[in-house]
Image (cartoon, grey):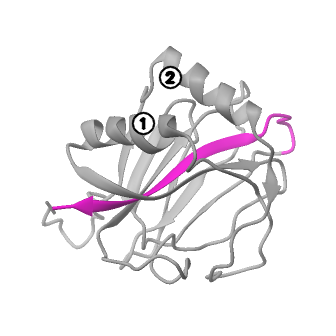
Amino acid sequence: MSCSCPKNHFNLDRIIAVKNFLSKEDLITADNIIKSEKWTIGYPAFKIIEGPMTSSLIIELSNYEFFTVYLKEKIEQQFNKKYRLKRVHVNGQSYGQNGHFHKDIPGNYPTFKSTHKEKSFCLYLTSPSTCDYGGYLLIQVPGEDFVAAFLPTYNSGVLFPSDYVHRGLGYNKHVTEMRLSVCWTLEEID
């Protein structure tokens, strides 16, 4: 669905933000799984759109049915769509660990073949208590001359086309917590 916006308006109908996505029990389970794993540094090899790469910490979550089946089904229910999972992982970013502009698909992961039906869903599992903490998700909207910015509010998520150029920013220097975002790359099934 798209809107016919006047030329002096912009259209974000392909980007959807949700709040209070998981139950308290689901948040505890996700947190326990992440705390049980070891972080690795960096990303798999993929094309950087712009700027130097600053490594985030990564945990691959594809071995956990909680993320690959249970939470994927919650995503499907939320957006009333069926998806095939391509990847799920958690990013950890501290102050100074800003991500780089990139696309999740196509072209960034050599093992993925794009159908141009891919969506990315980022779910935030931390939120500092300070007001101006940074950590935004920036999404370049194709055909527009601006970047949409989303606060990484605890238990909120953003769904957007995987071929949109985007980046996650680390929190500012006054925050000691790590910014955690669980990221699914999904292919919409007709």
Residue 165 placed where, x, y %? 50, 72
Residue drawn at 51 percent across, 15 percent down = 24
Q: Is residue 161 left or right of residue 174?
A: left
Q: Residue furthest top?
A: 24
Q: Along the line of sight, which residue is nearer the eye, 133 or 74?
A: 74
Residue 87 placed where, x, y %? 50, 59
- Give the residue number, with chain letter if any, for mark 2: 26
Q: Along the line of sight, which residue is nearer the eye, 149 or 16?
A: 16
Which corner quadrant of the image does residue 138 belong to?
bottom right
Q: Amino acid at mark 1?
A: Leu
Which corner quadrant of the image does residue 72 belong to?
top left
Residue drawn at 78 percent across, 40 percent down = 178
Location of residue 157 with respect to 45 vertically, above or below: above
Residue 176 placed where, x, y %? 86, 35
Secondary structure mostly seen in the magenta stretch: strand
Measured in 3D between alpha carbons, the distance from the residue under mark 1 to the one under mark 2, in whole angstroms, is 9 Å
Q: Secondary structure at mark 2?
A: helix
Q: Look at the image and give the residue range highlighted in magenta.
A: 173-190
Residue 91 placed where, x, y %? 68, 51
State if disc 2 and disc 1 touch (CB < 8 Å). yes
Location of residue 25 with respect to 147 vertically, above or below: above
Question: Label 1 crowding class (10 Å Cα cut-off): few <14, some 14-19, many 20+?
Answer: some
**In the picture, which quadrant includes the C terminus?**
bottom left
Q: Is residue 188 magenta?
A: yes
Q: Total of numbered circles in the picture?
A: 2
Q: Along the line of sight, which residue is nearer the eye, 26 or 128?
A: 26
Q: Amino acid at mark 2?
A: Asp
- Give the residue number, with chain letter if any, for mark 1: 71
